[in-house]
Image (cartoon, rainbow, N blue to C red):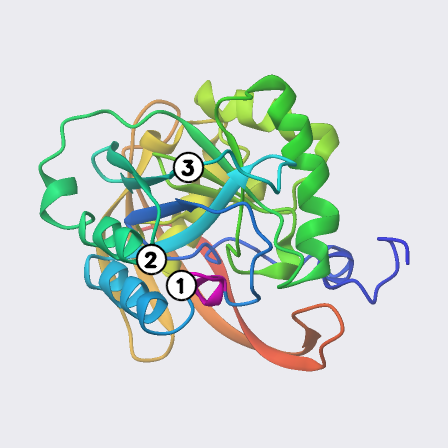
């Protein structure tokens, strides 16, 4: 089946131009656990995490504002004998701690490191590019993600990892940049290297920006809208100030700017529930929330 066939959820989302800003997973800290696969549909049900250990890893990460991903080097399902790596990354401070694991209990200990140990770390995190390739979750993630990972790996072989689900199958290919936490979607292999290069040069590809994961969806959408309007600019050129959430699904976000972005921009974000769309390949229509942002004059 060709990717242009609208039975593919990502092709259908692109065809209807579904907004992706505000769709990034929300987490300020990330636990990355090297596992060569195969990955279970629910990643933490992959042996040896199935059952109590996986549940505790997930709960522990959440208690520190974090989430867990399984990662592997691009295109390599096998692993070297011995211990595998784990990384705990703080997207606010740009720091990390890292180690190795052999058992599920080791990974649970790694999850606990997202707390005091990571808070006390002064070690700058090295850059990482995580591309979702989890075909067990959705075909689009694998079909679109693997060529992107392969292309980026040729340019940055020490930084690129395949990873499990980043949410939003229909926005494939999806990628998470660490330690800054920028999550992108609607990517393709042809333009991926240029996008990453521009991102690192302070020119965010704002129309592909799902959001920065340390912010809530409305803030993600507001920042993306400002970067679209006033960019090209870097992530640090647009940061949130005051956020006022109303009872009607509307949120006003004050964005404080630098560089090419005005000193202050107010954005109204409306969370709108849409229906009638398949959110995954082979699935029936389900409701989804999209975030529509409007820059205000005040």
Q: Does the CB distance between marks 2 and 3 fall below 8 Å?
A: no
Q: Secondary structure at mark 2?
A: helix
Q: Residue at x 61, y 54 (%)?
A: 134
Front residue (pair 298, 164): 164
Instruction: Look at the image and tell me in which quarter the N terminus lies.
Output: bottom right
Please give the residue where the numbered disc 2 appears in the rendered image: 104
- Image coords of residue 41 (percent x, y): 57, 66
Q: Is residue 284 left or right of residue 86?
A: right
Please give the residue where the numbered disc 3 appears in the rendered image: 82
Please give the residue where the numbered disc 1 appears in the rendered image: 49
Dot 1 or dot 2, earlier in sequence: 1
| Mark drawn on residue 100 | none
Q: CA distance from mark 3 to mark 1?
A: 18 Å
Q: Does the CB distance between marks 1 and 2 fall below 8 Å?
A: yes
On screen, residue 42 above or below 93 = below
Dot 3 or dot 1, earlier in sequence: 1
Q: Residue at x 45, y 22 (%)?
A: 200
Q: Secondary structure at mark 3?
A: loop
Q: Residue at x 39, y 35 (%)?
A: 178
| Label 3 Cα crowd, 10 Å radius (few <14 / some 14-19 / many 20+) | few
Front residue (pair 224, 293): 224
Front residue (pair 257, 220): 220
Q: Is residue 247 left or right of residue 121?
A: right
Q: CA distance from mark 2 to mark 3?
A: 14 Å
Q: Residue at x 48, y 35 (%)?
A: 81
Please report the bounds of the magenta region as a residue range.
43-48
């Amino acid at each position: 089946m060709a990717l242009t066939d609208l039975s593919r959820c990502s092709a259908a989302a692109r065809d209807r131009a579904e907004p992706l800003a505000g769709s990034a997973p929300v987490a300020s800290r990330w636990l990355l656990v090297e596992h060569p696969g195969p990955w279970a549909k629910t990643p933490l049900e992959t042996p040896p995490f199935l059952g109590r250990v996986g549940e505790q890893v997930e709960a522990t990460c959440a208690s520190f504002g974090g989430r867990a991903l399984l990662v592997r080097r691009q295109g390599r399902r096998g692993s070297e004998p011995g211990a595998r790596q784990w990384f705990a990354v703080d997207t606010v401070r740009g720091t990390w701690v890292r180690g190795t694991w052999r058992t599920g209990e080791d990974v649970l200990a790694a999850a606990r490191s997202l707390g005091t140990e990571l808070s006390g770390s002064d070690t700058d995190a090295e850059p990482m590019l995580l591309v979702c390739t989890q075909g067990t979750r959705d075909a689009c993630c694998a079909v679109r993600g693997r060529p992107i990972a392969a292309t980026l790996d040729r340019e940055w072989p020490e930084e690129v990892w395949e990873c499990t689900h980043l949410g939003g199958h229909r926005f494939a290919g999806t990628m998470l940049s660490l330690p800054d936490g920028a999550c992108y979607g609607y990517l393709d292999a042809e333009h991926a290297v240029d996008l990453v290069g521009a991102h690192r040069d302070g020119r965010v590809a704002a129309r592909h920006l799902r959001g920065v994961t340390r912010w809530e969806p409305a803030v993600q959408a507001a920042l993306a809208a400002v970067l679209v309007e006033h960019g090209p600019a870097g992530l640090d050129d647009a940061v949130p100030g005051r956020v006022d959430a109303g009872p009607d699904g509307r949120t006003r976000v004050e964005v404080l700017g630098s560089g090419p972005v005005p000193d202050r921009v107010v954005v109204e974000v409306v969370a709108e529930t849409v229906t009638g769309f398949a959110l995954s390949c082979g699935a029936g229509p389900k409701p989804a929330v999209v975030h529509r942002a409007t820059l205000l004059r005040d």
